[in-house]
């Protein structure tokens, strides 16, 4: 839909809550921009596109049940809003996007790359070039290399966006020592700093590289190379002492997995 004096209507589609929040933070407070909704699945995206009629959609490529490409097929390229694909694929795979001249954001993306993609989308709308873009979407669906992308695994989180006092700070995952739960929030412990995000521990556990992090308790995820000592206490109680001196409980159900990761024989 061409731009008018009304706000630019934006829909965010991603199955990862942190990824949706990252885009929300980048769009928040922009004059003339209205986020009309979020969708966490391909099916929900199809419904939202049809009912809310966004001008622009940030569309995750790989989602359970229905991929981003399948969303485009379901809606039909001729009915799709301007689309910025969000993906964790490598540069080689992304050549398919470049050939089709459809923009994308490669996770994890920085603010500058977002601004480039967002500015390009607005420019296309202002030029009333949506029909040409829809032809490119159709071309993208017909590109043979793209069909193989849908089975590629997602990359693990490399950065986590944290909102602090009206600003967004990006925390590299490699700097996180451990993560603890606090009600509906998770606390990222980075050296002496603590950053709070609204996220479930289960989601973080699934999105963090298991070669680097391990969940030792329902309320604690630890960077493995920060574990200094495994402590055995009375009554079958276990804990770990980290290199910074912090002690964290280890649940009985997770103790054996932790011992294996540390190269210990399960007792």
Image (tube, rainbow, N blue to C red):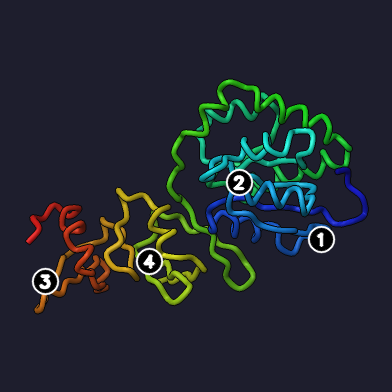
Horizontal relation, residue 153 to residue 116: left or right: left
Mark 2, secondary structure of its residue: helix
Q: Are marks 4 and 3 in contact (CB under 8 Å)?
A: no
- Between 259 and 176, the residue placed more toward the observer is 259
Instruction: Please give the name of the residue rendered at 29% of the width and 57% of the height, measured from the top-left corner.
Output: 214
> Residue 76 appears at what percent x and percent y?
73, 35
Q: Is residue 30 above or below residue 122?
A: below
Give how far apart the Cα atoms at labels 1 and 2 are: 28 Å
Label number found at residue 232: 3
Q: Which residue is mark 1?
A: 31
Instruction: Please give the name of the residue rendered at 41% of the width and 64% of the height, measured from the top-left corner.
Output: 201
> Residue 266 appears at what percent x and percent y?
9, 58
Q: Quadrant of the C terminus?
A: bottom left
Labels 1 and 3: the sequence-earlier one: 1
Q: Which residue is mark 2?
A: 42
Instruction: Please give the name of the residue rendered at 19% of the width and 68% of the height, measured from the top-left corner.
Output: 252
Horizontal relation, residue 248 to residue 124: left or right: left
Labels 2 and 4: the sequence-earlier one: 2
Q: Residues within 10 Å of mark 1 (few under 14, many from 20)?
A: few
Q: Residues within 10 Å of mark 4 (few under 14, many from 20)?
A: many
For marks 2 and 4, give the one nearer the viewer: 2
Q: Which residue is mark 4?
A: 179
Q: Quadrant of the N terminus?
A: top right
- Between 174 and 107, the residue placed more toward the observer is 107
Give how far apart the Cα atoms at labels 2 and 3 are: 47 Å
Horizontal relation, residue 137 to residue 246: left or right: right
């Amino acid at each position: 839909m061409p731009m008018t004096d009304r706000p630019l209507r934006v829909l965010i589609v991603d199955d990862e809550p942190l990824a949706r929040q990252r885009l929300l933070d980048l769009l928040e407070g922009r004059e003339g921009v209205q986020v009309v909704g979020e969708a966490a699945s391909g099916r929900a995206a199809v419904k939202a596109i049809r009912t809310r009629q966004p001008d622009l959609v940030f569309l995750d490529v790989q989602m359970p049940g229905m991929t981003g490409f399948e969303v485009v097929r379901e809606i039909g390229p001729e009915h799709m809003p301007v689309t910025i694909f969000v993906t964790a694929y490598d540069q080689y795979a992304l050549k398919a996007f470049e050939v089709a001249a459809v923009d994308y954001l490669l996770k994890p993306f920085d603010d500058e790359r977002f601004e480039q993609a967002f500015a390009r989308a607005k420019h296309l709308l202002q030029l009333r070039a949506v029909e040409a873009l829809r032809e490119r979407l159709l071309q993208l669906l017909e590109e043979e290399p793209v069909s193989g992308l849908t089975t590629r695994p997602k990359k693990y989180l490399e950065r986590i966006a944290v909102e602090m006092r009206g600003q967004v700070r990006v925390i590299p995952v490699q700097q996180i020592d451990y993560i603890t739960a606090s009600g509906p929030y998770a606390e990222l412990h980075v050296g002496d700093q603590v950053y709070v995000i609204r996220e479930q521990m289960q989601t973080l556990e699934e999105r963090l590289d298991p070669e680097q992090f391990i969940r030792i308790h329902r309320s604690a995820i630890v960077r493995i190379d920060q574990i200094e000592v495994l402590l055995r206490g009375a009554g079958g109680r276990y804990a770990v002492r980290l290199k910074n001196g912090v002690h964290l409980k280890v649940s009985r159900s997770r103790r054996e997995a932790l011992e294996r990761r540390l190269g210990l024989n399960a007792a």
